[in-house]
Image (spheres, helix red, strand yellow):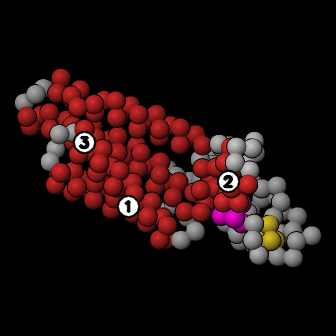
Amino acid sequence: MREDPRCPHCEEKVSATAAWCMHCGRDFESPVDAEGGGALDQLLGSAVTDAGTPGSSASGEVSDVDDVLSVLDRSEETRQGLVVAAAGVTWFLVSAVTGVTAGVALLASAAFGYYLYQLDDAATVLVRSVYGAAVLVVALRVFFAASSGGGLLALLDGGALVVVVALVVAGQWLDGRIDSRSSRW
């Protein structure tokens, strides 16, 4: 029996016989000790020692995304880093494929980053950043096409359609791999 049983995902105290965490709502096989073996230790440890082994964190199992998100949710600073990274990637995509100036792309991405900053958890930030980047690319491409007089065909120039389709597919992939119990919407 464990001396100080904790949830392997959020590291809150649980019963020694628990298979479910009342704090984060996630299922697990057995609690871990408080001294180590939490989500970060398991994620990093198994990624180094068991890389590619079925069932390990490095094997591409569905729980991998949830483990990374639980690590990102542990502090406000790590979630803020995710927001900054998402806004930066959005700025790059918007300036590369929409045809708007770098300043407009920066303002749009900064406003989008502010929106992402208001969200509560890393899962919501991640999924909405992918879908939101797709919406932002479409909206700015439509604006650019309308202002330049290029018409509807101008929407297809610059690879915007390929980027939007890739973002929607990535959003679907992520959404399917993030724990269904989290309240993203």
Q: Magenta stretch: dominant SS?
A: helix
> Which amino acid does the dot numbered 2 rest on?
Ala
In the rendered structure, the answer to whether residue 130 lies left or right of residue 25 reads left
Q: CA distance from mark 2 to mark 1?
A: 25 Å
Report the span colored magenta.
Answer: 38-42
Q: Is residue 63 visible?
A: no
Determine the residue positioned at 47% across, 40% down: 171
Amino acid carrying mark 3 in the image: Ala
Q: Residues within 10 Å of mark 1 (few under 14, many from 20)?
A: some
Q: From the viewer's perspective, tell me whether residue 122 is left or right of residue 22.
A: left
Secondary structure type for disc 2 = helix
Upstream in sequence: badge 3 or badge 1? 1
Residue 153, image x, y percentages: 18, 23
Closer to viewer: mark 3 or mark 1: 3
Q: Mark 3 or mark 2: name the one nearer the start of the chain.
A: 2
Classify residue 70 as left or right of residue 122.
right
* Residue on which the image places disc 1: 84
Q: Earlier in the sequence, mark 2 or mark 1?
A: 2
Q: Nearer the viewer, mark 2 or mark 1?
A: 2
Horizontal and vertical percent position of residue 168: 42, 36
Quadrant in which residue 158 is drawn: top left
